[in-house]
């Protein structure tokens, strides 16, 4: 087709499309995309974007350049401009953004189709997207259809997936046509309520599903007493779903040094638990636990036995049928979770044996080695007393010499007893020392 002369002396359509193609080629060369069919450049989406941009250009140029005046003249000129090559060029100039590589590439590919629609088909086929993307380039399908042959989606093209989901590949030449249901809906056509939802209302064309009570897998209403089946982690009892305490059963799988914490419908394994601002490990009595203390054990450790809810220490010393400590002079001593063998009272362990604990031999002492100073003073007093008594006896017989000695001794003793030392010695003597 020979290009028509431009209304304003501008370039022809071929030159405009060539320029757009060259611009796109330069941009593509600068940033080549190895996979133009990846999700970000899906062909139908790109074609729809081009068609939408083309339609906006038509709206933008519909009354361009005519702002009043001679109405008859404007209508005549507007009629000519409406389907002119000039207007087409103005529309095409704004179809693709400078950095939209896919759009430029697609516009170059669609040059002949664009010209054909503009000059020959737009009256008969006013939907540019349908004509270009569906019928000519075959990149898209009509709504409600999918795949290379535009087959109807599940549920039919008029209301795919019963209006409660989306058809995989809807409107494109790709996909499976299967329904991806919205939350709360299920079935191959999304025409029934999914797990955890119940049928709140239904008519010939519409279904509304509402959420069950949180523990219910299937239900007849929103109440906790309307459960038909429970979700995992709950058990059904008289139409109610009761939480399973996995920590109190063998259903929990935590490591030996972890706490098992029951939650709604499940459980958690935690390494430590905060107790009074400190992190506490499982009790030594436990193999796996549900909290602090020996009353929260899942199982009792070796050396402990279960008494109700608690794990108590086994007294190996008292419970053994035969002595557990068999060495000479050994006795059993119970410890937390175990026991140990120690030496009997009065014995110590030397070289692995229990022997009598005797102090080492000491040299023999003299007769007065253990006598204290106060005891020496008392002995001296006793000696002086005996001597005075003897002197008194002799003096009584009229012996002047012994009488003088007696009087002197009494005077000396009186002075001694009046001294500080005699007070101290007397005080000690009176106290039984």
Image (cartoon, rainbow, N blue to C red):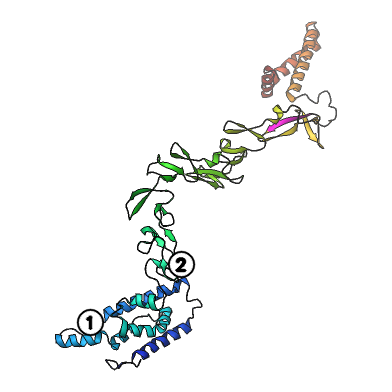
Instruction: Give the number of the mark in front: 1 or 2.
Output: 2
Q: In the drawing, what numbered circle is on residue 262?
A: none
| Residue 423 picture quarter | top right
Instruction: Give the alpha-carbon distance from disc 1 to disc 2, as whole Å.
Output: 41 Å
Residue 222 to residue 319: above or below: below
- Residue 200 in the image: x percent, y percent? 34, 48
Is there any visible trace of residue 69 in the rendered image? no
Q: Residue at horizontal 35%, vertical 61%? A: 159
Residue that badge 2 annotates = 175
Query: For this view, does 175 lie left or right of residue 221?
Result: right
Above or below — where is 339 with respect to 382?
below
The residue under label 1 is 63
Secondary structure, mark 1, is loop
Q: Nearer the viewer, residue 76 or 22?
A: 76
Furthest residue in direction top, as rendered? 397
Q: Give the left or right position of residue 428, taking residue 71 as reference.
A: right
Give, as a single range, the part of the protein colored magenta: 329-334
């Amino acid at each position: 087709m020979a290009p028509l002369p431009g209304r304003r002396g501008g370039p022809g359509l071929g030159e405009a499309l060539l320029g757009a193609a060259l611009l796109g080629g330069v941009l593509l060369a600068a940033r080549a995309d190895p996979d133009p069919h990846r999700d970000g450049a899906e062909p139908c989406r790109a074609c729809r974007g081009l068609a939408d941009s083309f339609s906006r250009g038509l709206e933008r140029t519909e009354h361009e350049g005519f702002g009043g005046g001679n109405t008859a003249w404007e209508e005549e000129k507007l009629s000519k401009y409406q389907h002119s090559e000039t207007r087409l060029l103005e529309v095409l100039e704004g179809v693709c953004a400078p950095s939209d590589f896919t759009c430029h590439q697609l516009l170059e590919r669609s040059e002949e189709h664009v010209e054909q629609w503009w000059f020959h088909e737009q009256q008969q086929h006013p939907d540019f997207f349908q004509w270009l993307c569906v019928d000519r380039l075959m990149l898209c399908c009509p709504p409600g259809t999918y795949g290379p042959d535009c087959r109807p989606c599940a549920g039919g093209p008029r209301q795919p997936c019963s209006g409660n989901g989306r058809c995989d590949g809807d409107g494109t030449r790709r996909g499976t046509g299967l329904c991806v249901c919205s939350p709360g809906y299920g079935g191959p056509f999304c025409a029934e309520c999914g797990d955890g939802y119940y049928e709140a209302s239904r008519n010939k064309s519409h279904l509304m599903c509402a959420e069950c009570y949180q523990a219910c897998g299937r239900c007849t209403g929103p109440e906790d007493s309307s459960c038909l089946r429970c979700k995992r982690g709950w058990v059904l009892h008289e139409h109610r779903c009761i939480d399973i305490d996995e920590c109190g059963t063998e259903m929990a799988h935590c490591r030996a040094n972890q706490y098992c914490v029951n939650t709604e419908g499940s459980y958690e394994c935690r390494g430590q638990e905060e107790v009074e601002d400190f992190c506490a490990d499982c009790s030594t009595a436990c193999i796996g636990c549900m909290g602090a203390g020996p009353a929260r054990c899942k199982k009792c450790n070796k050396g402990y036995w279960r008494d109700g809810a608690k794990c108590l220490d086994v007294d190996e010393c008292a419970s053994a049928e035969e002595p557990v400590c068999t060495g000479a002079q050994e006795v059993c001593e119970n410890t937390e979770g175990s026991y140990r063998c120690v030496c009997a009272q009065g014995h110590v362990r030397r070289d692995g044996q229990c022997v009598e604990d005797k102090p080492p031999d000491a040299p023999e002492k003299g007769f007065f080695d253990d006598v204290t100073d106060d005891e020496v003073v008392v002995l001296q007093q006793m000696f002086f007393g005996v001597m005075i008594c003897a002197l008194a006896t002799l003096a009584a017989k009229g012996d002047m010499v012994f009488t003088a000695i007696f009087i002197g001794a009494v005077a000396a003793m009186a002075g001694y007893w009046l001294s500080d030392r005699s007070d101290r010695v007397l005080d000690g003597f009176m106290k039984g020392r």
